[in-house]
Amino acid sequence: MKRKQQHKNKMSKATVALVGCDTYAEQRVYQAVEAGIKLLGGFTRFVKPGERIVLKPNVLFGSNPDKCVSTHPAVLKAVGRLLQQAEVDVYYGDSSGFGKCETNMRRAGLKAAANELGIKLADFDKGRAVTHQEALLNKRFVIANGALDCDGLISLPKLKTHGLTRITGAVKNQLGCIPGIRKSQYHVKMPSPYDFATMLVDLTTLLRPRLYIMDGIIAMEGNGPRSGWPKHLDILLFSEDPVALDATACKIIGLDPEFVPTSAPGEKARLGTYHDENIELVGEDIASFIDQDFAVVRRPPVAVRGGRWRILARNWVCPQPTIDTGVCTNCGTCVSHCPATPKAVDWHTGDETIPPTFKYDRCIRCYCCQEFCPEGAVTIRDTFIGKVLFH
Ligand code: SF4
Ligand code: SF4
């Protein structure tokens, strides 16, 4: 009997709730978030009165909400309002690639939204070391104080494309709980996209957000996560299972979840499931949201492991970042954020009046330059051999 019960638990499905919403008008978003939470059984399943709960939006650089780089303020506000009605002490925070958390929150319109409700900013600029013995790969993290000094997190990812991990979704959203530039050091430590993704899974099993609410009302396709194009998908997704949530988002944008490198380690770590048969969709019919034309790279990331030929093989097959010199403003952001030592993108000629160039032998293909470029001047291009092999 006991064994049967265990089997049943093992086979219980992950629930993902889908709610349509075609606008960021506050009241409409509020109603949609309320409906989504209700489909999962109500906020009382996730929080208790008096608890300190931190909302973790995806902010990146704090761009204007119209650019769709960050979780929209209307989503933060709707979740915050509902939590306050549940008598929760609500905070918010995220550590972006650079700059102070508060500055980026202001730029993204999230600070104004939070201030209207009296939601307080948590400390995501400083952190402390934490060990994670059950981790698959990375057993030590430095985590933002704000993410540690709370009773629980609610993760508010934005549905966007990402050069390294295909999408930046529910699992990847916890990367912003690592304060400051420490994040980019993981690219050096773990240059394989699969190791990097396993680290993201470890981070999420450490932090265990209680709930994930994904902003897919206007998503980002193309050259994401910063320089892509806004695309209406008109949907909010809700789940306790971040792997299932990301897999459902993949289904909507016509991407095989196998191509998202957090999927397999996410299942291995028992963080969740990405297999259709283990996911129960509730709410609106997913068919009405599917967009097969969504611009996303539909193949797995390429990883080249150790050995003497690694650099050569990487240069042959791994997609390369390139700079459109007509768009580049020569700001140097890519240079300052390149984690490779020595820098792979730099003014190698010594002339800082012209756009930087790449030394691909040094490049670990983290695509931070593409992610951080404020002008969208950096794109990721397939190599000739990569095209032949993977298309
Ligand atoms: S050049 Fe770009 S992709 Fe290469 S290591 Fe530097 S930041 Fe990463
Ligand atoms: S970050 Fe973009 S705009 Fe700035 S120097 Fe690099 S490529 Fe040019």
Image (spheres, rainbow, N blue to C red):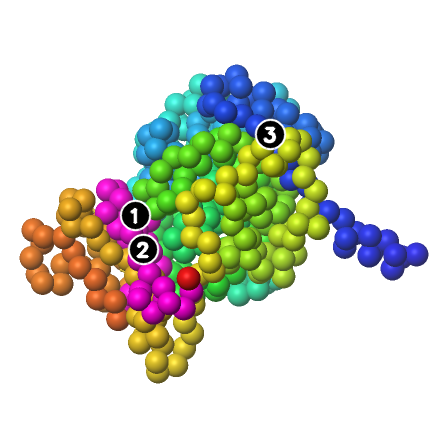
Q: Secondary structure at mark 2?
A: strand
According to the image, label 1 marks what residue? 372
According to the image, label 2 marks what residue? 380
Q: Tell me the residue at 53%/23% (across/down).
A: 29
Q: Quick one: label 2, few (<14), some, or many (20+) residues within 10 Å?
A: some
Alpha carbon of mark 1 to alpha carbon of mark 2: how far? 13 Å
Three-letter code for the amino acid on which mark 1 is drawn: Phe
The first of marks 1 and 2 along the sequence is 1
Tally the numbered discs.
Answer: 3
Q: Secondary structure at mark 1?
A: helix
Is the CB–ligand 1 distance for label 3 below 8 Å?
Answer: no
The image's mark for residue 19 is 3
Magenta-colored span: 362-390
Q: Tell me the residue at 31%/55% (across/down).
A: 380
Three-letter code for the amino acid on which mark 3 is drawn: Val
Left or right, residue 367 beside residue 27:
left
Three-letter code for the amino acid on which mark 2 is drawn: Ile
Q: Quick one: label 3, few (<14), some, or many (20+) residues within 10 Å?
A: many
